[in-house]
Amino acid sequence: MADTIQIELSNQSCGAGLEYARKQSAGPAKDAILCCEGMCLKGETARRAANLMGHRLVPEKTVRICHGGLLEKSGGMRDLIQRSSRVLVLDGCGMACCSRLTKAAFPELQPEVVFTNEMTTYAGDPFGIDEVPEAEITANAQKVAAALVSKYYGGC
C-alpha cells in the first residue's frame, strides 16, 4: 500500500458551487471555512458546525468552502480561499483529513486548525451518527459553532 496518494486536479466543476463562489466573490473578502466531511459522528459534527457558522451565524464574515472545489484546477472555491484573510479548518478528529487535503491543495497556506472533537461531549466513543440521538448531534454542533464564533468573531 502506498504512503501517499496523488490526486489529479480537474477541469470539471460544479455549476452550483461556481455560482455560490461568484456571489461570494462579489463582496468583500471573507474568512474561508473548510471542515471535515467524514461520515462518522465527529465529521458530521464538524460539518454541521461549519455550516452553522458559514450560513447562519456569521455569513457576512465567513464563506463555506467545499472539498470538491479544492480539486478544480482554478476558479470557484480555490479563488475564495486565495482571497480570504483567514482560513479556518474544522477537523473532526486527529486524523486531520481536511488539514491534509487543504495543505495538498495549497502547500503555502497556513490555516488555523480546530479539532472539534475536543469541544464535544458524547458518552463513550460513538462512531456512527445512528449511535446518538439527533438532538445530541445538533446540540454539539451548535456548541462548537457558538464557541468558534465567540473566539473568532466576538459572539453571534
Image: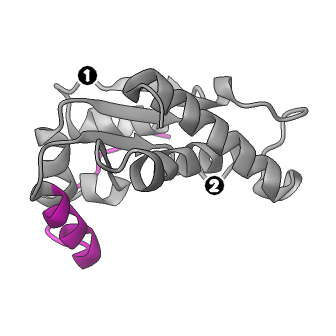
Amino acid marked by disc 2: Met
For residue 39, the mark is 2
Quarter-of-image position of residue 118? top right
* Between discs 2 and 1, the one toward the N terminus: 2
Q: Is residue 5 magenta?
A: yes
Disc 1 marks a residue whose amino acid type is Gln
Image position of 99 (left or right of 52) = left
Left or right of residue 60: residue 1 = right
Q: Which residue is mark 1?
A: 110
Of 122 and 109, the residue lying toward us: 122
Element under label 2? loop
The answer, for residue 26, to whether it is visible in the render is: yes
Task: Work out how far the residue at label 2 is from the one at label 1, CA to CA, in angstroms.
Answer: 26 Å
The residue sitting at 26% across, 73% down in the picture is 14
Q: Which range is magenta?
A: 1-24
Q: Is 107 in the magenta? A: no
- Where does residue 32 sit, x and y in percent of width and height? 29, 41
Q: On screen, 126 above or below 149?
A: below
Identify the residue at horizontal 14%, vertical 65% (top origin): 22
Q: Residue at x 36, y 23 (%)?
A: 112
Q: Position of residue 21 (x, y in %)?
A: 19, 61
Is 27 situated above or below 107? below
Instruction: Examine the image and state in which quarter residue 115 appears.
Output: top right
